[in-house]
Image: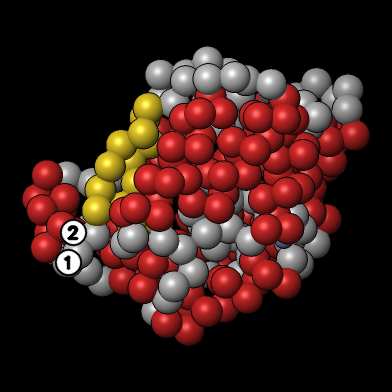
């Protein structure tokens, strides 16, 4: 049996939204099982980390349905990594987004902000704070709330209300109700840096001030948030698997 995180990742392939997904954890037995189910699994070693844009020894594991299609994209990425101009780096980020089936509008904005040295993560966190998303999430946790556009961790929609990203989230949940819990993990992943910033608070930027007043305004939810974030930070993979097992009863 596949771990619950991996089986929910596969929903993105089964619904035809993506050809490829990036599991957070996979073991030998699961690789064999996936191969029997007709999936291909391979590793890509980055020269430059597509998230930090710094030299990297990071490897990514991909599970995909159409292996040739995925390899075609990775070959292009490999070529771009040989000649790292800003333009090529941007294209490289876009190709990884394409590989993982992210919407075009979100990929374009993400890659532009990255190349400009801005943080797409920060802009989504600001939107979550300003729209009361975190607060509502904390109120109902461990039950998930409806934030369809954050359909997978490490995906940053061009805006929280992006129609394309929201439609994807909706389709995934329609296919498998448990997908809501995967989205909950994406929210926790965004909430975690908020508390890190709050802890080292130096109110020099607008973002710092926003984070400070947000955490201070949480009232009784603050303790609950700190507990979740602390557990998640210790071991995000274990947190996700334990959470999914408990809420999905598997
Ligand atoms: Zn978008």
- Residue 67: image quadrant is bottom left
Q: Report crowding for label 2: few under 14, some 14 to 19, many 20 or more residues within 10 A (C-alpha).
A: some
Q: Quadrant of the image for the C terminus?
A: bottom left
Secondary structure beneath dot 1 equals: loop
Q: Mark 1 points at which residue?
A: 37
Viewer can see residue 224: no
Q: Report crowding for label 1: few under 14, some 14 to 19, many 20 or more residues within 10 A (C-alpha).
A: few
Q: Residue furthest top?
A: 55
Nearest the eye: 182 or 239: 182
Q: Is residue 192 above or below residue 52?
A: below
Quadrant of ligand 1: it is bottom right
| CA distance for labels 1 and 2 | 5 Å
Label 2 within 8 A of ligand 1 by Cβ: no
Q: In this view, does 137 lie above or below 203?
A: below
x and y, in percent, of residue 33 in the image: 12, 59
Residue plotted at (63% across, 76% down): 167
Q: Mark 2 points at which residue?
A: 34
Q: Quadrant of the image for the N terminus?
A: bottom left
Q: How is the image coloured?
A: secondary structure
Q: Is disc 1 in contact with disc 2, using a CB cutoff of under 8 Å?
A: yes
x and y, in percent, of residue 29 in the image: 9, 50
User: Which numbered tag is attached to residue 103?
Assistant: none
Viewer can see residue 98: yes
x and y, in percent, of residue 73 in the image: 47, 45
Secondary structure beneath dot 2 equals: helix
């Amino acid at each position: 049996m596949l771990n619950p995180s991996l089986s929910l990742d596969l929903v993105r392939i089964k619904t035809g939204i993506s050809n490829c997904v990036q599991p957070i954890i996979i073991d030998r037995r699961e690789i064999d099982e996936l191969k029997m189910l007709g999936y291909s699994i391979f590793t890509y070693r980055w020269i430059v980390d597509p998230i930090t844009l710094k030299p990297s020894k990071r490897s990514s594991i991909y599970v995909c349905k159409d292996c040739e299609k995925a390899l075609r994209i990775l070959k292009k990425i490999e070529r771009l990594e040989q000649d790292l101009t800003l333009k090529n780096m941007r294209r490289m980020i876009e190709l990884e987004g394409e590989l993982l089936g992210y919407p075009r509008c979100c990929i374009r904005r993400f890659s532009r902000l990255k190349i400009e040295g801005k943080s797409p993560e920060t802009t989504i966190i600001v939107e979550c704070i300003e729209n009361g998303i975190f607060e509502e999430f904390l109120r109902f946790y461990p039950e998930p709330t409806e934030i369809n556009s954050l359909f997978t961790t490490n995906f940053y929609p061009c805006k929280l209300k992006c129609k394309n990203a929201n439609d994807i989230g909706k389709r995934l949940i329609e296919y498998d109700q448990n997908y809501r819990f995967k989205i909950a993990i994406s929210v926790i992943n965004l909430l975690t840096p908020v508390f890190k910033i709050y802890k080292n608070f130096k109110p020099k930027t607008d973002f710092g001030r926003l984070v400070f007043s947000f955490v201070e305004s949480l009232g009784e939810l603050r303790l609950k948030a700190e507990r979740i974030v602390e557990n998640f930070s210790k071991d995000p993979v274990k947190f996700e698997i334990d959470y999914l097992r408990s809420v999905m009863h598997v």
